[in-house]
Amino acid sequence: MKIGFDHNKYLEEQSKFILERVNNYDKLYLEFGGKLLGDLHAKRVLPGFDENAKIKVLNKLKEKIEVIICVYAGDIERNKIRGDFGITYDMDVFRLIDDLRNQDLEV
């Protein structure tokens, strides 16, 4: 299979442009779509994409960032279940917090 996505360039470019924005503001909020860890959908549609690319970008910036997790309260109230893990969204938030802290990221 041909590689269509340059992971190293992605890390370099994303980190560079995020740092440029950070230096222009007192506080900068970034939203990441999809999964931060294990983004298998992105890996499927972008040959060469590292399923953990987003967390690697955050790791490169970890001295300058703090992670805030936002989740739709309605999903928690209804006990919505994640199909891939079979756990509720509130439990998934706790799992994500643990995963991010294991990456030495401030949550």
Image (cartoon, rainbow, N blue to C red):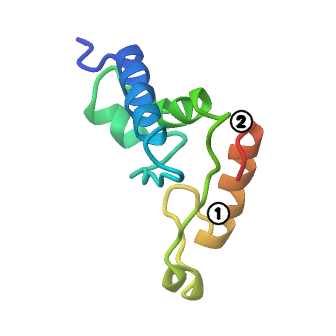
Task: Name which of mark 2 and mark 1 comes first in the sequence.
Answer: 1
- According to the image, label 1 marks what residue? 93
| Whole-number angstrom distance, CA of label 2 to CA of label 1 | 15 Å
Which quadrant of the structure image shows residue 95? bottom right
Q: Amino acid at mark 2?
A: Gln
Location of the N terminus by quadrant is: top left
What residue type is disc 1 on? Val
Residue 23: x and y in percent read 48, 37
> Is 58 left, or right, of 90 in this rendering?
left
51 is higher (above) or lower (below) than 100: above
- Number of marks in picture: 2
94 above or below 104? below
Residue at the image point whose x is 44% and y is 51% from the top: 30
Quickly name the residue at label 2. 103
The image quarter containing residue 6 is top left
Return the x and y of residue 60 as percentages of the image width and height: 58, 26
Vertical position of residue 58 compared to residue 47: above or below: below
